[in-house]
Image (spheres, helix red, strand yellow):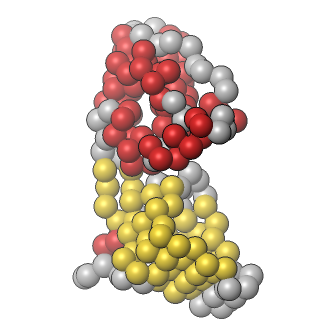
Amino acid sequence: MPSIQSLRVESGESAVLSPKSQLYKENYRQVRPRTAKEVREVIGLSEGMAKTMREQDIRLPQSMNLPAVVAAADLDSSHEVVRARALDLTHTALREYVLSANPSVMTHMEPALERYLDIAGLILNIVTFEKTIEVADGATLTISEDTHVLEVSRIIIHGTGKINCSGFTKFNVDSVEGV
């Protein structure tokens, strides 16, 4: 079955974009990043956005507190408490790295981040519509929490139509219109 080029959610209807949906599964592709840099390239700030944020001294709230340094070996520790803490801190560090306007401050964490990605087996789900997503007045499009990137040429939202994101989703969109 070929992928759907455009999506329209009619008035009074609700639709869910999910990699588990039979209707939209052909629009999804999966990426399994091996490095933090690859994660950042897929779901993080673009280099242009990061540059603008640095120039204007804009910081995202989560980028204020850098996590503790974690040794990659702690992620494989036989001590459950050490391993659990290392996994938690490295998860936080990965998020900080991906959303930071200046990821170079986290280069010391790269060995632990790569080991974390090996352990976690992170899979990023990307959904693509080549043309338009249109949400009619009174309609709702929900994007599942396991959809990490939405790529579409144009989004049109009419009246009280809305798009709900259940998790962190990066939008790669050429234009958004509210009608």
- Residue 107 visible in the shown view: yes
- Residue 139 visible in the shown view: no
Residue at horizontal 51 percent and vertical 55 percent from the top: 170
Measured from the top left, where is residue 25 in percent x and y?
35, 71
Measured from the top left, where is residue 159 in percent x and y?
73, 85
Q: Indicate left or right for 30 with 143 as reference.
A: left
Taking 151 as reference, is 83 above or below it? above
Taking 89 as reference, is 28 above or below it? below
Farthest residue toward the front?
A: 55
Farthest residue toward the right?
A: 160
Measured from the top left, where is residue 10 in percent x and y?
59, 90
Residue at horizontal 51 percent and vertical 30 percent from the top: 102
Image quadrant where one finds the C terminus: bottom right
Q: Which of 137/21 is in front?
A: 137
Image quadrant where one finds the N terminus: bottom left
Quarter occupied by residue 20:
bottom left
Residue at horizontal 61 percent and vertical 61 percent from the top: 165
Q: In the rendered picture of this protein, how many numbered marks are placed on residues? A: 0
Q: Which of 107/70 is in front?
A: 107
Quarter occupied by residue 158:
bottom right
Measured from the top left, where is residue 49 in percent x and y?
52, 47
Residue at horizontal 42 percent and vertical 66 percent from the top: 151
Farthest residue toward the left?
A: 1
